[in-house]
Amino acid sequence: MNWTVDQIPDQSGRIAFVTGANSGLGLETTKVLLEKGAKVIMGCRSIEKAQNVIYQFHEKIDSGLIDWIELDLGDLTKVSKAADQVASKYPRLDLLINNAGVMAPPRTLSKQGFEIQFAVNHLGHMALTLKLLPLLDKQTGARVVTVSSGAQYMGKINWGDLQGEIQYDRWASYSQSKLANVMFALELNNLMKTSKSEVDSLLAHPGLARTNLQSTSVDANGSWQEAFAYKLMNPLFQSARMGALPQLLAATNPTAKGGEQYGPRFNVRGYPKPCRIASLALINSDRKKLWDVSEKLIRDFV
Ligand SMILES: NC(=O)c1ccc[n+]([C@@H]2O[C@H](COP(=O)([O-])OP(=O)(O)OC[C@H]3O[C@@H](n4cnc5c(N)ncnc54)[C@H](OP(=O)(O)O)[C@@H]3O)[C@@H](O)[C@H]2O)c1
């Protein structure tokens, strides 16, 4: 049987924090969680974009169910501040959905000088998660869901040049950041189990979904070839609503477990099912190495 949002149990009383909640998969995830009764804190960097979403919902839901906290994952000071704000407003957290992402821009640096995809997709989410763990730990059955990508299967960690300083390839860097998401989520799950924490860390791979990810990337690069390729590939892409199903399943299905990854049945599209984890993410020593390197880079902010 296909897994659909109809199978999501009532989420009333649960508090979710969704990064990148104003667009694409994050927006669909926010909508569905609200429809199912959860309280959703939207982590977004633009107040205008967050307010637009809140406005869309103002007649449909109790306004107390939706909140916005400023979150710029490209600035670790702001990540730290956002986590502190969540902790000051909420006694606990049931769900953290590490969804926001940026794909294949020209080489750009984060506020702290890290390559932007490594910074936003991986380091920012790692810092946010570590800061929010005490809140998640207060709740039985709390989950962290990190949104990966099919790019994980092409990704390699370039240990000698993590930040693309010697040579920057924007697609290799995106794939590296998405593999890093997978390695982080698995290592987090292991650490939670070792420390007897009940927090589960899961992964969701959306396949190909029509969102702003592709147009933002094309606008940043000005590449007509990529714009043309997306036009040709358009029939392969599924809706953002379908693309959000794996993360919704990972977040809400009572039988989903820490360490699992959910993705579309036909890899790029389809209803969600458990899916293969990139083999490079299964190397324990590399996961530990990435964790240690990343922890050093973010240590002043967690
Ligand atoms: N769509 C796909 O086919 C696909 C495939 C594989 C994986 N994914 C993954 O799915 C996730 C969601 O992407 P999407 O497709 O929904 O793309 P999207 O529509 O472009 O949404 C990306 C979200 O991330 C936010 N974001 C970007 N940089 C940020 C930063 N520095 N700080 C805070 N938020 C930031 C964006 O905010 P702004 O609106 O302010 O820019 C937006 O809310 C990403 O992790 C992506 O890698 C998507």
Image (cartoon, rainbow, N blue to C red):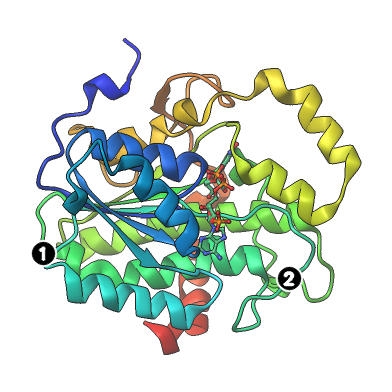
Which is more foreground, mark 2 or mark 1?
A: 2
Extreme residue in the bottom direction = 300
Image quadrant containing the C terminus: bottom left
On the rendered structure, is 84 left or right of 294?
A: left
Task: Name the element at disc 1.
Answer: loop
- Residue type at the position of mark 1: Lys
Residue 159 in percent (x, y) is at 67, 70
**Residue 44 shows in this picture:** yes
How packed mark 1 is, by other alpha carbons closer than 10 Å (few <14, some 14-19, many 20 or more), is: some
Residue positioned 59% across, 46% down in the render:
152
Q: Quadrant of residue 267?
A: top right
Disc 2 and disc 1 in contact, CB within 8 angstroms:
no
On the rendered structure, is 239 left or right of 244?
A: right
Residue 139 in percent (x, y) is at 11, 58
Residue 134 in percent (x, y) is at 19, 71
Residue 48 in percent (x, y) is at 48, 59
Q: Up-down: is 6 above or below 69? A: above
State the separation of the CA atoms marked 2 and 1.
37 Å
**Along the line of sight, which residue is nearer the eye, 5 or 123?**
5
**Residue 260 shows in this picture:** no
Disc 2 target residue: 108
On the rendered structure, is 130 left or right of 219?
A: left
- Residue type at the position of mark 2: Thr
Residue positioned 63% across, 25% down in the render:
237
How many tags in the picture?
2
Residue positioned 52% across, 82% down in the render:
297
Image quadrant containing the N terminus: top left
Q: Up-down: is 11 above or below 302? A: above
The circle on residue 138 is: 1
Q: Quadrant of residue 150?
A: top right
Task: Name the element at disc 2.
Answer: loop
